[in-house]
Amino acid sequence: MDLQTLTYLVVGATFTLYIGIAIWTRAGSTKEFYVAGGGVHPVANGMATAADWMSAASFIGMAGLIAYMGYGGSVFLMGWTGGFVILAMLLAPYLRKYGKFTVPEFIGDRFYSRTARAVAVLCLIICSTTYVIGQMKGIGVAFSRFLEVDYNVGLLVGMCIVFFYAVLGGMKGITYTQIAQYCVLILAYTIPAIFISLQLTGNPLPQLGLGSTLVGNDTFLLDKLDQMVMELGFKEYTTDVRLSGLNMFAYTASLMIGTAGLPHVIIRFFTVPKVRDARSSAGWALVFIAILYTTAPAVAGMARLNLMQTIEPEPGQYLQYDERPQWFKNWETTGLLEFEDKNGDGAMLYTANPATNELVKVDRDIIVLANPEIAKLPNWVIALVAAGGLAAALSTAAGLLLAIASAISHDLLKGMIAPDISEKQELMASRIAMAAAIAGAGYLGFNPPDFAAGTVALAFGLAASSIFPALMMGIFSSRVNKEGAIAGMLSGIGITLFYVFQHKGIMFVESTAFLGSMPENWFLGIEPNAFGAIGAIVNFAVALGVSAVTKAPPAEVRELVEHIRVPAGAEAAVDH
Amino acid sequence: MAKKMTEEQARAYWHRNLSLMIKLLLVWFVVSYGCGILLVDELNQFRLGGYKLGFWFAQQGSIYTFVVLIFIYRWRMAVLDREFDVEED
């Protein structure tokens, strides 16, 4: 069977599965819509959280980034996993004990202020929207590359699928489809990695393969990789620092704190029955995530090695362009891979020097997507990778859209504008909000704004600087008051946006960058994507400072803080 | 349903929770920011198979440690909950 038919078959089968689950898990109450009824098993929730969390960026983008950044790419590995440790210890159990439906609802109650709740809704919508644009783009791109349909048609199909299960089933539908999506994406990620690890090192575990010797000689894979990249003039793979140690520190911290502060991840912990389930569920989520995240560095290193050995089979002997393999031709037609014969010798010269390098464009996303083809794996593996990429993008998009929709229907409508609506009306409103959120995200996917690139990293910076500090102070201090929390959130997200706009342009229009993207102008040499950690520090400092000079919170708020710190009596998530 | 805690018990429970948390977060900091970033050059002098040790911490070891830390926290907190009789039914 040819690759095209096989891909349609595999992707079609997974989509049928998701729709089947949607019909089976229709939500009948607001509690089912917002928190899946509150009875999800911690291991199941861990799996759903893993799919919710691992987006197109994790599945497609990350290994490519690591392949090019080497050691510097570690910021993504540590940052995107270490956040679960702080989530499990500092936020999840207490927010589960509090037992309501949304993140802004906790902020509104704890800081006894509708303004605080509204500010939290604003921060939530800003970071979730920047994040969802990347997913919509991922869905469109995956379709257009693997199924050779138009980007817009692909996006529309993806939107219909999400619409079907998210509007019908809410959190309940999303939870069970995410479990299925996790299984698809983890198989799609690990199977090619196992094959490639076996081919190169003879060790079936990629995590061990990366540290093993190559088949047929006793050179370690990483030593060979270091030697090859250095011969081409790149920095040594295993020690290539990203800008500076301080920058790597700040970048890792931004991603960790952002991970713990992303609302679509936090609300997943409202779906488990008990406080201790919230603790173990975070652990299970990280187990499922770690399977992909410890495989990714192996995929990265091995793909880089395979790519270089394809282009330069013997030292100094470069592949003739006319003899290039089929996968090279396929990716050239997508524009993600470009060759320019600068010296006219017909061979593909690959070096770190931009003046003589003839592989003028190697898009980083190719690393995961073309990896099975480069390694000459069977067609069904390639088809599976397509389904896996779609599963990763769809599951994260659905989780983000739910966070946005519930902030609109539960926090804005029920909480502020029309508190008297019945549960049935709120359920209807939440479905309409979900449909509107999908339409809005789709619109942004069809007309990707200029700032679409790099938005995912920005979403973390924004969550780190606004939501995480407010939640943490709400739990760990009974002294921080509404004035402090509001001022803290606004100044944290404000300074982070300011720093990013200042260097990357207002709304990322480059000509409006008033300090330029010049590294010399960066504060302590910290790149804009890593600035969330500084934003978080500003948030903490402003909130504590303002709280110290304004009135202490009322007694019932101090009781609320005492209440959430102890697990006993963690009733199921209830609506007031 | 557990009985209501006295204020003193509640404070002691919170204190024990915090001290456990601080110990575990110290390990969290040391394996990632410490071994993976600040001390990476020093550790890279040692090897673990084909891995330089600092590189291994940054791309493998820290992640395994994170998983273990969360399960230790869960286990120690379950013991603490029992001791203070604040378990959920």
Image (cartoon, grey):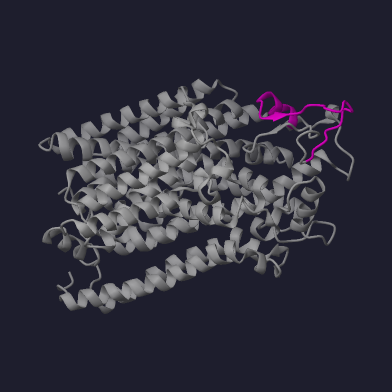
**Left or right of residue A320: residue B52:** left
Q: Is A343 colored magenta in this rendering?
A: yes
Q: Which of A337 and A197 lies nearest the eye of the viewer?
A: A337
Residue at x 63%, y 43% (from the top left corner): A64
Residue B72, given in percent of the width and then of the height, sits at 43, 71
The structure residue drawn at horizontal position 76% and vertical position 33%, both measured from the top left corner, is: A359
Magenta range is A328-351
Secondary structure character of the magenta stretch overall: loop
Q: Position of residue A145 (x, y in %)?
A: 60, 28
Question: Can residue A504 be spotted in the picture?
Answer: yes
Magenta run includes residue A156: no
Compared with B36, A183 (above or below) is: above
Picture quadrant of residue A97: bottom left
Q: Is residue A232 above or below residue B35?
A: above
Q: Quadrant of the N terminus of chain A?
A: top right
Residue visible at 36% across and 44% down? A493
Is residue A269 something one can see in this rendering? no
x and y percent of residue B39 in the render? 61, 67
